Amino acid sequence: MKPNNIYFLILFFVIIFNIVLGNNDITPRHVHLSLNNDPQSMVFAWITFGSLPHSSIPIVKYGKDINSLTNTVTGSYSIFIYHGIVRHMYRATATNLEYDTRYYYKVGSEGNFSKIFSFKTFPQGNNIPLKICIFGDLGIENDVSMIPLRTAGLRGDFDMIVHVGDIAYDLHSKDGTLGDEYMELMEPLISSIPYMVIAGNHEYDWEAKNFDNYEKRFYMPTNGDGKNQYYSFGVGPIQFIGVSTEFYGFFYDFGIQPVLDQAAWLEKELQKANQNRKNKPWVMTYQHRPFYCSNENSMECDAFENRVTRMGYLNMPGLEPLYGKYGVDVNWSGHEHSYERMFPVFNRQLYNQDSDPYHNANATTYIITGSAGCHSYQAKFGKPSPFSAKRLNKYGYTVMHIKNMTHLYFEQIDVEATGTDSVVDSWWMSKDIDYVIKDEIRKNSKFVDLRIEYTEVPNFIKSLCTGRSIRCREIFSKDTLKYSKKIDLQGEEYSKYKYDIANPDANSINNNPRSYL
């Protein structure tokens, strides 16, 4: 029997089994919103644990009057079976929505609707004020930020969410029921504002060797891989690009083709973003694993997993060269369970010599916001990194305030703070109209050169070739790498860093150094 026939036969018996046992709960659950690339639309998603009657279809009813939901949109339907539990997944998209308008809605089918939720569309145009909440690494256990996030979002402290990976810890745990619990807890918030997500390492199901629980539960824009791993969308003056670092982190399971496919797509997407800078002057990427950090457990993000993502490995291209080439303004990440804001940096060259390094920044600014709270608690810091402008081991989340086309204001919120002192870091970014970070700008700017050469190829990577293909061994045998030359660099505080001031007026900088802490 063909594999597809076996799958549908199993699916048939699982559905019949659930019906016979009376597991036909068609109550809509896990209602949440997301964006696509149409500013006048909204994507709705929900699930049921039971199958809708044959004569029923999934729909969303919505309108501007809570007592008159006169508009209807039909949804699509799929089935997700995990460890014997059947989840019926639905999504629908409302289009031609009015700007800056409150809508009320309910999801389900005739006779079996959810309660009524509401959301507000964004104002029209690019030069609009918005508040965007960004965080990562939020779980069920030790969910310190869960209630504060819900409270803040529902009172209007932010207009949408970007979750930079590691969701629920883990979506697939306990046969997926832990993911169900997370979605129930978040529903009051994410049914009211768009919830944009990207995969982290905890979205990877080690048993199944896939991201199915992540890919099936969410519906991000389909202009990338179509499975929520990478995609892009625009909001106000910002072009957001979600990127998978997990294709790098698990390349020994998936091979290098997903990395190559993403890199080819990303370059085209960044090219399009740069062609549209007059409308969206800010380009921001977000991903799970960071390039730069000063956490003790990550050896200042010089661990192999960080380096392979940043610089590439073998014939896999890294992400940072593309970010630098096309002038990405800000990169968001999590993974480290802390908050850390970097000075602008590219290829370990530190651009903090200007009086305001965040105005017309000479390189990408990296922000880690992984302190929402999860089972493994906070990540301790090691020695201060020279790239770090601010680092905090406090549970919380980040809010980015879009003030206009040229000015952004950022706040880090401490959810355990008492009184009104919850903002523990705040700062501005600004740029002139038409300003884009370019190679020639970096070359003509003052920077601190902290580049180093790495010498080792991890043994666990080498050993992968033993049980893998001849092609893997061939790649290693031809690999001259950047790891082959050993350089012994000495420094007073950072033994592995070489401090060179690369600018024509080094003496003036040495006489007035900026603090690295």
Image (cartoon, rainbow, N blue to C red):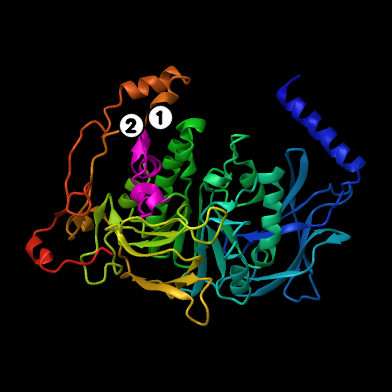
Range of residues picked out in magenta: 290-317
User: What amino acid does circle 1 point to?
Assistant: Ile
| Vertical relation: 12 (above or below) 194 | above
**Residue 56: % across, % down:** 86, 51
User: Callout 2, which amino acid?
Assistant: Val
Under circle 2, the secondary element is: loop
Of the pair 348 and 330, the residue shown nearer to us: 348
Q: Residue 75, labelled with which disc?
A: none
Does 379 sit left or right of 161 as displayed?
left
Residue at 89% across, 42% down: 19
Kindly indicate whether the residue at mark 1 contacts the one at mark 2 (C-beta within 8 angstroms).
Answer: yes
**Numbered label attached to residue 461:** 1
Q: In this view, does 288 lie above or below 485?
A: below
Quadrant of the rendering where the N terminus is positioned: top right
> The residue tagged with tag 1: helix, strand or loop?
helix
Residue 281 position, x and y percent, is 38, 64
Q: Quadrant of residue 503?
A: bottom left
Q: Is 313 included in the stretch rendered in magenta?
A: yes
Compared across the picture, whether 97 is left or right of 380 comes to right
Q: Is residue 216 magenta?
A: no
Q: In which quarter of the image is the C terminus?
A: bottom left
Vertical position of residue 245 compared to residue 232: above or below: above
- For label 2, the crowd category at 10 Å Cα-Cα, with few meaning under 14, some 14 to 19 and many 20 or more, is some
Residue 345 at x, y percent in the picture: 29, 56
Question: Could you tell me if residue 92 is visible in this image?
Answer: no
Determine the CA span between mark 2 and mark 1. 7 Å
Mark 1 burial class by Cα count in 10 Å: few <14, some 14-19, many 20+: few
Q: Where is residue 490 in the image (x, y as percent from the top left)?
A: 16, 46
Q: Can residue 58 be seen in this view?
A: yes
Horizontal placement of 478 versus 69: left or right?
A: left
Q: Pointer 2: what residue? A: 457
Residue drawn at point x = 53 percent, y = 71 percent: 415
